Image: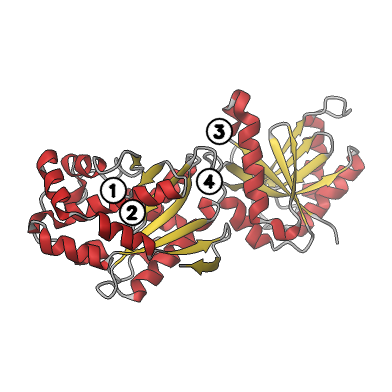
């Protein structure tokens, strides 16, 4: 069975100068990791990567894998032939037969002759192939500015032919900027924050605080589903489920009523820091957006940041809710996020939370709670779930 070939375009990576090889190596690794079942091999040529897969590779899975791999700006199923005009015409016909187009509309030939030893110019190649297209689809017209489809021909070491490429997510390959821990809730915001952080090259794992029986097992299943949906963008992810019922009950009992959310956020930061250090991560990511809720004012975030020495990254800080919802719909997490299974933050929230805490005073109040033992106990009982780069759950461990 003949192998399948995909052309992959890079974007920002091409601007990385002396570090470019490191970014490209990571991108190749991330792609091969997702598609290893089909013996994925990748070759590099100027400005392009060429992905070779077994002939039985599932094209829909390949499409989903490449469209969720940061560092890829575009990709297309491609066909390779020898540098001979008869071979190019034959391959073009095969491409058009494999991917039939509407009998009416417009097209464009985009020919690029990278190998200047090839006797025909880019213009000559375009003219010859336009005749081929017209011969197969007489009703199609040429439109060089806004065609309904474009046939691309690149003359390099070999000749590569492909139709319109699909858009990739861009950004930088995951794991080129370090590791971070995401505070993942069951809401709309935190999955979007994970995607935006990963787009800048962060390797992101997730922490979820579970308060059973105050939050149901359905709430946990919802969060696991969210982890599976974002896992392809994250190159796979681990979900650390922290049982925090006793900790929250202690906060509820001993803290000032208007500070319960603030104290809980502080304990989450301390817990996340301990887990992050254990797992060799160096930053914490949250889904907070400035002034969206009471715990997301500058004063409140300044206080919770003071609970950790780690860098706290808030990718959504300048976004409004509509922008966040739009992104959630694009990445496919929105419908799961709005399922009516509340997380622990919502259930234990006070009616009138403090919005502008005084940092020094709130720190004293938090220290009086003596949460270290509860945090250590919760981490000791933590469960871990792994979701692979295609979003499939692969076992769990206590």
Camera-side residue: 255 or 191? 255
Element on which disc 3 rests: helix
Q: Position of residue 311 (x, y in %)?
A: 35, 38
Residue 353: x, y in percent? 11, 54
Sequence-wise, the earlier of marks 2 and 4 is 4
What distance separates the C-alpha of mark 1 from that of mark 3? 27 Å
Quadrant in which the N terminus is drawn: bottom right
Q: Earlier in the sequence, mark 4 or mark 3?
A: 3
Around disc 2, counting alpha carbons within 10 Å, would you say few (fewer than 14), some (14 to 19), or many (20 or more)? Answer: many
SS at mark 2 in the image: helix
Left or right, residue 10 beside residue 361: right
The residue tagged with tag 1: helix, strand or loop?
A: loop
Q: Quadrant of residue 10?
A: top right
**Res. 262 visible in picture:** yes
Which callout, 3 or 2, points at the residue further toward the start of the chain?
3
- Locate the C terminus and report the quarter of the image it occupies: bottom left
Disc 1 marks which residue?
A: 288
Q: CA distance from mark 2 to mark 4?
A: 19 Å
| 341 relative to 55 in the view: left or right | left
The residue under the point 62% across, 24% down is: 18
Is disc 4 surrounded by few (<14), some (14 to 19) or many (20+) residues within 10 Å? some
The image shows residue 289 at horizontal and vertical percentages of 27, 46
Among the two numbered marks 1 and 4 on one chain, the one whose residue lies closer to the N terminus: 4
> Callout 1: few (<14), some (14-19), or many (20+) C-alpha neighbours within 10 Å?
many
Q: Of 150 and 202, which appears nearest the observer?
A: 202
Q: Which residue is mark 2?
A: 189
Circle nearer the N terminus (1, 3): 3
Per the image, the residue denoted by label 4 is: 169
Mark 3, residue position: 12
Which quadrant of the figure has residue 113? top right
């Amino acid at each position: 069975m003949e192998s399948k070939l995909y052309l992959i375009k890079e974007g920002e990576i091409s601007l990385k100068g002396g570090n470019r090889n490191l970014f490209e190596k990571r991108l190749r690794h991330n792609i091969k990791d997702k598609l290893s079942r089909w013996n994925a091999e990748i070759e590099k040529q100027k400005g392009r990567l060429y992905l070779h897969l077994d002939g039985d590779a599932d094209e829909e899975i390949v499409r989903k894998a490449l469209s969720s791999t940061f560092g890829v700006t575009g990709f297309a199923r491609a066909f390779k032939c020898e540098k001979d005009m008869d071979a190019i015409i034959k391959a073009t016909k095969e491409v058009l037969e494999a991917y039939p187009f509407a009998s009416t509309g417009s097209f464009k030939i985009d020919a690029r002759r990278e190998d200047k030893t090839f006797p025909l110019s880019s213009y000559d190649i375009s003219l010859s192939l336009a005749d081929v297209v017209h011969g197969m689809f007489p009703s199609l017209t040429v439109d060089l500015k806004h065609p309904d489809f474009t046939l691309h021909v690149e003359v390099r070491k070999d000749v590569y032919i492909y139709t319109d490429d699909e858009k990739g997510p861009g950004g930088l390959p995951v794991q080129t900027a370090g590791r971070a821990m995401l505070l993942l809730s069951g809401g709309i915001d935190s999955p979007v924050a994970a995607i935006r952080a990963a787009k800048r090259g962060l390797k992101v794992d997730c922490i979820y605080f579970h308060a059973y029986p105050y939050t149901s097992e359905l709430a946990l299943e919802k969060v696991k589903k969210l982890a599976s949906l974002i896992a392809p963008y994250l190159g796979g992810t681990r979900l650390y489920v922290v049982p925090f019922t006793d900790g929250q009950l202690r906060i509820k009992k001993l803290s000032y009523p208007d500070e319960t959310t603030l104290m809980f956020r502080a304990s989450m930061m301390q817990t996340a820091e301990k887990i992050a250090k254990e797992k060799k991560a160096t930053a914490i990511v949250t889904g907070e957006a400035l002034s969206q809720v009471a715990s997301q004012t500058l004063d409140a975030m300044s206080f919770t940041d003071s609970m950790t020495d780690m860098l706290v990254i808030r990718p959504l800080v300048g976004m409004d809710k509509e922008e966040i919802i739009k992104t959630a719909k694009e990445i496919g997490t929105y419908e799961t996020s709005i399922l009516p299974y509340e997380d622990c933050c919502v259930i234990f929230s006070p009616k009138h939370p403090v919005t502008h805490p005084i940092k020094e005073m709130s720190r004293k109040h938090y220290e009086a709670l003596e949460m270290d033992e509860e945090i250590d106990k919760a981490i000791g009982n933590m469960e871990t779930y792994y979701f692979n780069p295609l979003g499939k759950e692969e076992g769990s461990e206590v």
